[in-house]
Amino acid sequence: MTAIEKLKEQQSKVPERSAPWMVAEQLMDLCRREPDSAELIAQDLDNPDMSIVEAEKRIKAFADKHKTGNFSCVAPDQAERILREFYGLREAGTEMPGVIDLDLADFMG
């Protein structure tokens, strides 16, 4: 089962448009952009401690810690940083360690 399939499965168990549901949406976007991260997320989602509900708790904790009066908000880029940390993913825009980017044109005469 792919990460996106697992995310959709977990998403179906929470109310639509709830915070965990939105976490799944953000993770699916990340998986589409970064197949290597999708593989790690797929493995982690098998662990109940790494579910979208648990990931959302990390984002909520950040929001609660940075409250202004009765208002709290987490920007999408900050939420992504929290999710990357939670799932042990590389920083956006960096390559996976040990991955070599080859261009076959370099080897052709």
Image: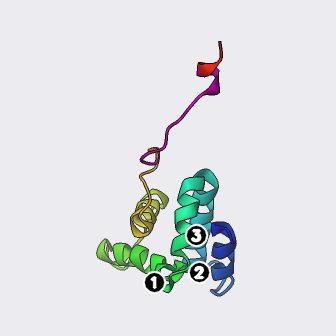
What residue range appears in magenta? 96-106
**Quarter containing the N terminus:** bottom right
Q: Would you call the spot at circle 3 few (<14 residues within 10 Å), some (14-19), or many (20 or more)?
A: some
Disc 1/disc 3 C-alpha distance (Å): 13 Å
- Residue type at mark 3 is Ala
What is the distance, in whole Å, between disc 2 and disc 1 at their CAs? 19 Å
Q: Quick check: marks 2 and 3 in contact, CB under 8 Å?
A: no
Q: Amino acid at mark 1?
A: Asp
Q: Position of residue 69 (x, y in %)?
A: 32, 77
Which residue in the protein does label 1 denote?
49
Q: Which residue is mark 2?
A: 18
Mark 3 and mark 1 in contact (Cβ < 8 Å)?
no
**What numbered label is drawn on residue 42?**
3
Question: What's the amino acid at mark 2?
Answer: Ser
Q: Is residue 5 left or right of residue 47?
A: right
On the image, which quarter does residue 7 sit in? bottom right
Q: Which of pointers 1 and 3 lies earlier in the amino acid sequence? A: 3
Relative to 31, 68 lies left or right: left
